[in-house]
Image (cartoon, grey):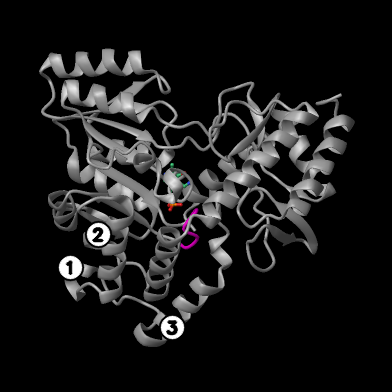
């Protein structure tokens, strides 16, 4: 190995380990469900994004197995070279119907969507107004586009209006976009899409919503944009197929022209092999399940409300989440990490999230209840929360 590389790696690893920033990744033995096994110990899992429990759903598993039998395990090549599988076409039609748009295109991951779509639509002659709490993949996608990036205070509509006006009236940019998460995953708050659309109309902004945490959760499952009835107003709806949908991949939904253009201009579409047959069929099955019934969605919200009420009654600070995402805000970073560690020792798997992912002094343990949790699991989790919370002086 190059000596320079070795020194670089070692000094970075040492720094991270010395400062408590090195993330030791647990090995999950078996499926990732509402309960998981880590180092032989069964834990109530409040850390996954598998909101609807679909990651282990029997119908999805069967759909994947069937597609592997008929289509094999790989797609063969990028779609522009080797053609699009009929399974991809079926998925994209289903996604467009689900999202209420003319068309949709699937990518290999949600992260890839943001690498693909932002850069395809925006370039160095443009400006992007971006909520300061947007996901890392949005930030990277914006950087890749070479457009001027203008940070907007979190969900601050006065700041958005002022910065949109300034950007448009400066005459410096050919196009201006506003990009935001639909649901912010650290606090569970929802983007103010109706006001955003009004401001966008006033200044002819392109609107882009990353609904990774809203799909399957908001709008009776169809997402945050549909929740507000704004399918015709938001230009790009992007989301992941790995969280509530339970598989892997991402999508962009919008007008036929947008999707046609992404298929010739988005680099991860042009240069990276498409979703596997098994994943594609399982995703289609998941989306069809959500379109046919709101049962899983309703159960998710019931469980979310139950856990929130339980934690609040115990005296925990749970913030102002508008979705099932339930942060338990501890404040001090080290205490949040210690709290998460003690919860795990007692049987609850809920990860601590600290600066720089959230602002300094708002260290927290974040809970992600799902439709697959039983009342008994949630009651057990609450008992453990009470015990560890009292022991650490977080609640009285
Ligand atoms: N956008 C947001 C808001 C996300 O939370 C995530 C996943 N953490 C992604 C994009 C990336 O999605 P994926 O995991 O499918 O790459």
**Along the horizontal axis of the image, is 131 left or right of 45?**
left
Magenta stretch, residue numbers: 243-247
| Viewer-nearest residue: 265 or 124 | 265
Q: CA distance from mark 1 to mark 3?
A: 25 Å
In the picture, the disc for residue 303 is none
Q: Position of residue 34 (x, y in %)?
A: 67, 57
Image-quadrant location for residue 122: top left
Question: Which residue lies under the disc numbered 2?
Answer: 269
Q: Which of the two discs, 3 and 2, labels the residue nearer the N terminus?
A: 3
Image-quadrant location for residue 154: top left
Disc 1, disc 3: CB below 8 Å? no
| Residue at left offset 84%, top offset 42% | 383
| Nearer mark to the viewer, of 3 and 2 | 3
In what element is the residue under mark 1? helix
Q: Main secondary structure of the magenta part?
A: loop
Q: CA distance from mark 3 to mark 2?
A: 25 Å
Q: Is residue 358 visible?
A: yes
């Amino acid at each position: 190995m190059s000596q320079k590389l070795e020194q670089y790696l070692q000094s970075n690893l040492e720094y991270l380990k010395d400062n408590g920033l090195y993330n030791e990744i647990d090995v999950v033995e078996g499926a990732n469900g509402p309960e998981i096994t880590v180092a032989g110990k069964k834990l109530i899992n409040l850390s996954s994004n598998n909101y609807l429990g679909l990651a282990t759903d029997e119908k999805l598993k069967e759909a994947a197995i069937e597609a592997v039998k008929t289509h094999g395990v790989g797609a063969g090549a990028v779609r522009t070279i080797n053609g699009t599988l009929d399974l991809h076409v079926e998925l994209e039609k289903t996604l467009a119907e689900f999202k209420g748009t003319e068309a949709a295109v699937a990518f290999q991951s949600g992260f890839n969507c943001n690498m693909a779509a932002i850069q395809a639509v925006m370039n160095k002659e443009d400006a992007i107004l971006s909520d300061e709490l947007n996901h890392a993949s949005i930030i990277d996608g914006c950087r890749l586009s070479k457009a001027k990036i203008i940070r907007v205070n979190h969900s601050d509509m006065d700041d958005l209006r002022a910065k949109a006006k300034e950007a448009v009236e400066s005459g410096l940019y050919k196009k201006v976009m506003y990009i935001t998460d639909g649901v912010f995953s650290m606090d569970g708050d929802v983007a103010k899409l109706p006001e955003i659309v009004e401001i966008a109309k006033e200044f002819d902004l392109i609107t882009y919503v990353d609904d990774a945490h809203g799909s399957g959760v908001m709008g009776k499952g169809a997402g945050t944009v549909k929740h507000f009835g704004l399918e015709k107003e938001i230009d790009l709806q992007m989301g992941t197929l790995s969280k509530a949908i339970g598989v892997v991949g991402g999508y962009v939904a919008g007008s036929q022209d947008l999707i046609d253009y992404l298929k010739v201009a988005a680099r991860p579409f042009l240069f990276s092999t498409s979703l596997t047959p098994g994943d594609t069929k399982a995703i289609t099955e998941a989306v069809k399940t959500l379109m046919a019934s709101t049962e899983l969605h309703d159960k998710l919200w019931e469980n979310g409300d139950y856990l929130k009420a339980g934690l609040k009654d115990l005296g925990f600070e749970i913030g102002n989440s508008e979705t099932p995402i339930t942060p338990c805000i501890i404040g001090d970073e080290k205490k949040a990490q210690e709290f998460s560690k003690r919860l795990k020792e007692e049987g609850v798997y809920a990860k601590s999230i600290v600066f720089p992912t959230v602002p300094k002094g708002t260290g927290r343990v974040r809970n992600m209840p799902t439709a697959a949790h039983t009342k008994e699991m949630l009651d057990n989790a609450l008992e453990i929360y009470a015990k560890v919370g009292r022991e650490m002086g977080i609640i009285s």
